[in-house]
Amino acid sequence: MSALLEVRHATQRFAGLLAVDDVSFTLTPGEILGLIGPNGAGKTTLISIISGTLAATNGQVLFLGERIDGLPAFRRARLGIGRTFQIMRPFPGMSVLDNVAVGALFRRAGGRAGLAQAREQARACLDFVGMGRHADQRADELGGPGRKRLELAKALAMQPKVLLCDEVMAGLNHVEIDEVIDLLRKVRDQGIGLLVIEHVIKAIKSLSDRLLVLHHGQKIAEGAPDAVLSDPVVVEAYLGKRRT
Ligand SMILES: Nc1ncnc2c1ncn2[C@@H]1O[C@H](COP(=O)(O)OP(=O)(O)OP(=O)(O)O)[C@@H](O)[C@H]1O
Ligand SMILES: [Mg+2]
């Protein structure tokens, strides 16, 4: 299958630090690629290079075969690159529903959809992530798990073709993690390609078709989850230091 997203030689230098160092990979429609690695490995930076919130020092990002690395973040979002944020930032003072409606409106800019239609779409996204009953609550009153789901609903309201998820399971209990895994599979079933950053190894192993491991900004392994997780290089760099 042809690549939905292709990253070529992505490199990000922050002063003396190579946060992402010559990373290349592809993502196909309906594929879930897990992105793992120790704290500071460059995972979030890689997502920011793809979504355009960072202008990479070097490398190319192609979406459906076209270069998008010269485009600002909002144009990439409109093309279909969606992301969630590790540090969640709901619009405070606004309802959960309107937080999601902002995404729907943004996507529709240039079209004719009004606020009512955006809210309708937002409601469908909230139902999809299991947050329908919180629609009228203020977004900043949500607890951690609710905010994670809100992040997903906001991203989905923009009707992405690629969804970049930055630790959407962090801080969740086992039941909540399983629910989010089911949710991400349902997203995948729509043909969306997912790049999912996650520290919970059990979860990312069961969810991912492939895994990519970053360490000090470099790709140290990529492939089938079982093979990658038993790779001595990965065990030494990451797994050995943590409980799996
Ligand atoms: N805007 C920035 N300016 C300078 N250094 C940065 C910036 N953003 C990230 N870094 C550094 O780049 C490296 C990679 O950071 P990044 O946030 O991508 O790691 P990560 O793999 O997402 O880690 P975590 O698992 O803790 O979220 C770190 O050393 C970090 O301190
Ligand atoms: Mg991160």
Image (spheres, helix red, strand yellow):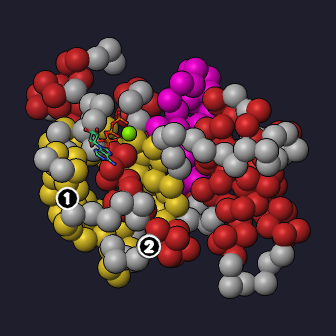
Q: At label 1, which amino acid type do we have?
A: Thr
Front-most of 116 and 15? Answer: 15
Question: From the Cβ of disc 1, is ligand 1 less than 8 Å away?
Answer: no
Is 158 on the left or on the right of 139, as rendered? left
Is residue 7 among the parts visible in the rendering? yes
Q: Residue furthest top?
A: 243
Percent x, y of residue 215: 19, 38
Q: Which residues are magenta?
A: 167-188
Q: At label 2, which amino acid type do we have?
A: Pro
Front-most of 210 and 156? Answer: 156
Q: Secondary structure at mark 2?
A: loop
Is 139 on the left or on the right of 158, as rendered? right
Tag of residue 11: 1
Q: Which residue is mark 2?
A: 72
Question: From the Cβ of disc 2, is ligand 1 less than 8 Å away?
Answer: no
Mark 1 to mark 2 CA distance (whole Å): 17 Å
Asked whether residue 174 is drawn in magenta, I would say yes
The N terminus - image quarter? bottom left
Q: Secondary structure at mark 1?
A: strand
Crowdedness of circle 2 by 10 Å Cα count: few (<14), some, many (20+)? some
Crowdedness of circle 1 by 10 Å Cα count: few (<14), some, many (20+)? many
Counting residues from the N terminus, which is met first, the one under dot 1 or under dot 2?
1
Residue 17 is drawn in which quadrant?
top left
Percent x, y of residue 183: 61, 43
The C terminus - image quarter? top left
Percent x, y of residue 97: 80, 51
Q: Main secondary structure of the magenta part?
A: helix
Tag of residue 115: none
Relative to residue 21, is residue 57 depicted above or below? below
Is residue 65 among the parts visible in the rendering? no
**Residue at point 72% right, 55% down?**
100
